[in-house]
Image: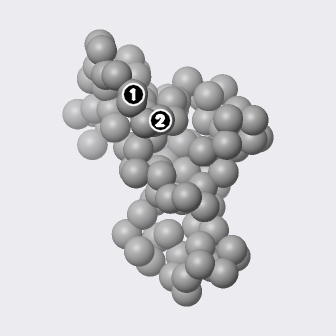
Amino acid sequence: MRDRLAGCACLLVDGTCWDDDEVIRLGRGRRTARQMGHLPIAGPGGSLQQLSPLPVERTIYTHLNNTNPVLLEDSPERRAVERHGVEVAVDGLDLWI
């Protein structure tokens, strides 16, 4: 899959959860992100680790759960994502490549 993504102009990625146990830890559910079919952003094997080395012009996390701390512009999680050159989608985002 990585070979197929190399060089694409814009990659939209599911960013539902920051951590695998986020929903459980916050008392919002009983299943991990992976059990619900989502790859968490953080941690070993997380999407940020897998995507940041790809030669993609723009990578943007979409489909963000309201428990995800990357939604907070001043959070350490948001800064970590941005340090890796990945964007967080916001309402009204324009996709001009």
Q: How far apart in space, not on screen, are marks 1 and 2 (Cα)?
A: 6 Å
Q: Which residue is mark 1?
A: 93
Question: As rendered, which of 92 and 33 lies closer to the eye?
Answer: 92
x and y, in percent, of residue 17 in the image: 54, 59
x and y, in percent, of residue 61 in the image: 45, 41
x and y, in percent, of residue 51 in the image: 46, 37
Residue 6 visible, this angle:
no
Residue furthest front as drawn:
92
Question: As rendered, which of 93 and 82 lies closer to the eye?
Answer: 93
Residue furthest left as drawn:
4
| Residue 28 higher or lower than 90, as above or below | below
* SS of the residue under disc 1: loop
In the image, taking residue 61 as reference, residue 74 lies left or right, namely right
Question: As rendered, which of 11 and 29 lies closer to the eye?
Answer: 29
Quadrant location of the N terminus in the rendered image: top left
The residue at the point 39 percent across, 30 percent down is 92
x and y, in percent, of residue 77 in the image: 70, 43
The residue at the point 58 percent across, 67 percent down is 20
Q: Which residue is mark 2?
A: 90
Quadrant of residue 81 within the rendered picture: top right
Residue contact between numbered discs 1 and 2, judged by CB atoms under 8 Å: yes
Colouring mode (rainbow / by chain / secondary structure / one colour): one colour
In the image, taking residue 59 as reference, residue 97 lies left or right, namely left
Residue 31 visible, this angle:
yes
The residue at the point 60 percent across, 61 percent down is 67
Quadrant location of the C terminus in the rendered image: top left
* SS of the residue under disc 2: loop
Residue type pointed to by label 2: Val
Residue type pointed to by label 1: Leu
In the image, taking residue 84 as reference, residue 97 lies left or right, namely left
Q: Residues within 10 Å of mark 2 (few under 14, many from 20)?
A: few
